[in-house]
Image (cartoon, rainbow, N blue to C red):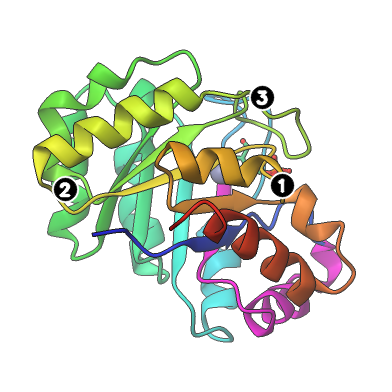
Amino acid sequence: MQRLIEIAPSILPADFTRLGEECLALEAAGVDRIHLDVMDGVFVPNLTFGPDIVRSLRKHLSIPFEAHLMVTQADEFAARFVEVGCSTVLVHAEACVHLHRSLSNIRSLGVRAGVVLNPHTPVNTLVHVLAQTDQILLMTVNPGFGGQAYIPLLDKIAETKALVDASGFDIDIEVDGGINATNIAECAAAGANVFVSGSALFKYADRAAGVADLRASAQSTRK
Ligand code: DX5
Ligand code: ZN
């Protein structure tokens, strides 16, 4: 069974003086979820926003929020982002000493648990936590900034897809970093079904046209 193609915009490129309007425009443009890049300045060399910003956005949108936690205290912050309305929490394997427990804890909060792998982190990191995982996020940039150059990791995506298919578990495979209407097709063909796009999508003044281009390009790889 092929999993739904989903477009999950990163809001990092947004005009933060109009963040609510920008997110409403993304929702109106037909995105499937909002991808929230949370950075603590320690796990990655950048700082973004916290739970209070997400709480204020939650009131105005109806689509799901996913929190991409690029933070050293992933366990502590997972609960905070669930409280303010995130229905998926993604933690970096590199930030979790006890990844199995971190993912189990997220699920015990009643939301979807996601694990993120940096470009260098091998897929076999996932082998013993697939039963606790609802989503795998493969970074196609080194985390910390939007607008970086895409790192093609097609073998890694294909390896992840094969692992998930062999497991029989119901897991989304997401890619994040430098994704645009061109390279999204190769990522979809390799096995990804959820796509984060920040700078490429925000380059479209007509956001709906950008979402349509991304979705059509990903869909084009399907029979
Ligand atoms: C990077 C973030 C990504 C990034 C995506 O650390 O996790 O979500 O902001 O933005 P683009 O699509 O511009 O690479
Ligand atoms: Zn992200």
Q: Quadrant of residue 223?
A: bottom left
**Element under label 1?**
loop
Quadrant observed for ligand 1 in the rendered image: top right
Where is residue 186? Give x, y as percent: 57, 38
The residue pinned by badge 3 equals: 45
Q: Is mark 1 within 8 Å of ligand 1?
A: yes
The residue pinned by badge 2 equals: 105
What amino acid does circle 3 point to?
Answer: Pro
Instruction: Say which label, 2 or 1, has the lower sequence index.
Output: 2
Where is residue 139? Give x, y as percent: 52, 31
**Element under label 3?**
loop
| Residues in magenta, as a range | 15-39
Q: Are marks 3 and 1 in contact (CB under 8 Å)?
A: no
Q: Is 163 displayed left or right of 95 in the figure?
A: left
Q: Are marks 3 and 2 in contact (CB under 8 Å)?
A: no
Q: Is residue 21 above or below residue 200?
A: below
Q: Is 74 displayed left or right of 47 in the figure?
A: left
Q: Is 44 displayed left or right of 105 in the figure?
A: right
What amino acid does circle 2 point to?
Answer: Asn
Residue located 31% across and 31% down the image? 160
